[in-house]
Image (spheres, rainbow, N blue to C red):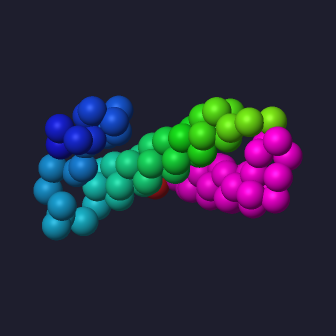
Amino acid sequence: MAELKANGLPYAPGIPTMPGKARWRAMANQALALLWAAQGEIQSYMDDRSEAWQESQKAEALQEVKEAILEAFFCAEAIDI
């Protein structure tokens, strides 16, 4: 829990074996937080690179990964649990 708090992420559900909407919603929110954090870290990484790197194929490939993460984020966010 300390690690989640340190990273600004929500706590895991209190009773991990109890099914229900509250647990699933908490799990989905945690997944959303992780996706958002991942794309933010990728963007920061890209911003810190040189202009030459930002114009490279590596940057283009990483941009595609970031866009896929954002797409997953927005698709998951649209799910109403």
When the figure is inspected, residue 38 is found, relative to residue 79, above or below; the finding is above
Residue 28's image quarter? Answer: bottom left
Coordinates of residue 73 in the picture (x, y in percent): 59, 51
Count the marks.
0
Q: Which residues are magenta?
A: 52-80
Q: Is residue 40 left or right of residue 63?
A: left
Residue 68: in magenta span: yes
Residue furthest toward the right?
55
When the figure is inspected, residue 3 is found, relative to residue 14, above or below; the finding is above
Q: Is residue 23 visible?
A: yes
Question: Who's the residue at 62% across and 55% down the image?
Answer: 69
Residue 54: in magenta span: yes
Coordinates of residue 68 in the picture (x, y in percent): 69, 59
Q: Is residue 77 visible?
A: no
Question: Who's the residue at 35% across and 55% down the image?
Answer: 27
Q: Is residue 2 left or right of residue 47?
A: left
| Main SS category, magenta section | helix
Q: Is residue 19 left or right of residue 61?
A: left
Q: Is residue 58 left or right of residue 78?
A: right
Coordinates of residue 52 in the picture (x, y in percent): 82, 42
When the figure is inspected, residue 45 is found, relative to residue 66, above or below; the finding is above
Question: Who's the residue at 68% across and 38% down the image?
Answer: 49
Taking depth in this image into account, of 32 and 19 the one nearest to the observer is 32
Question: Who's the residue at 77% across and 45% down the image?
Answer: 53
